[in-house]
């Protein structure tokens, strides 16, 4: 039980606050953060193109803090809507280093995926699935006030 307690504490006291800070920095520097669907733009050739939008800043923050691959647009932050300028690039690179440095020396016990899912659903229930979406919506509302 002690190991799971450390896991929950590391997620709620390290990962979540860092993810909120990184997502906020990314959103204020031009990374998309919205729940709206595709937008139609006119490119330089004069063609109308549909561009995907979504909670990109929140997904990218977790992607880099957890050093997971991929990205919202599937190009590992090479897409201009996911990584629009040098400041967002620096925030993403620093975020990749934060978690390995913060977790140096934290002991953990490996557990199977099905056991972990069962335990987390038992502990957090449906709120553990819905609360992240509420948090993303709150970030979207806060950012939309200032932009």
Image: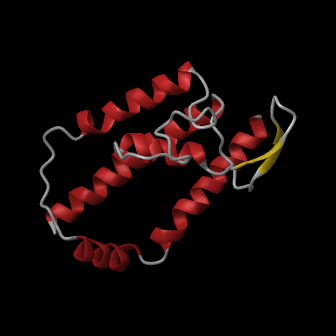
The residue at 59%/23% (across/down) is 85
- Is 38 displayed left or right of 132 in the figure? right
The answer to whether residue 113 is above or below residue 73 is below
- Is 140 displayed left or right of 5 in the figure? right
Q: How is the image coloured?
A: secondary structure
The answer to whether residue 38 is above or below residue 76 is below
Q: Tell me which corner region of the image, top left, top right, bottom left or bottom right, holds residue 97.
A: top left
Which quadrant of the figure contains the C terminus? top right
Q: Is residue 17 visible?
A: no
Q: Where is residue 75 shown, x and y percent of the image?
A: 50, 41
The answer to whether residue 129 is above or below residue 19 is below
Q: Where is residue 125 shown, x and y percent of the image?
A: 42, 78
Which quadrant of the figure contains the N terminus? bottom left
- Is 25 displayed left or right of 142 in the figure? left
The residue at 65%/51% (across/down) is 54
The residue at 69%/49% (across/down) is 53
């Amino acid at each position: 039980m002690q190991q799971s307690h450390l896991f929950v504490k590391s997620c709620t006291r390290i990962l979540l606050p860092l993810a909120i800070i990184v997502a906020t920095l990314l959103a204020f520097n031009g990374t998309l953060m919205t729940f709206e669907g595709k937008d139609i733009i006119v490119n330089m050739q004069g063609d109308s193109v549909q561009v995907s939008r979504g909670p990109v800043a929140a997904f990218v923050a977790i992607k880099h803090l957890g050093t997971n691959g991929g990205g919202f647009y599937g190009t590992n932050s090479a897409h201009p809507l996911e990584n629009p300028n040098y400041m967002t690039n620096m925030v993403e690179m620093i975020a990749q280093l934060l978690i390995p440095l913060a977790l140096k020396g934290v002991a953990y016990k490996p557990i199977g995926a099905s056991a972990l899912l069962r335990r987390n659903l038992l502990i957090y229930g449906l709120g553990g699935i819905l609360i992240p979406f509420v948090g993303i919506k709150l970030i979207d509302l806060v950012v939309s006030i200032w932009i």
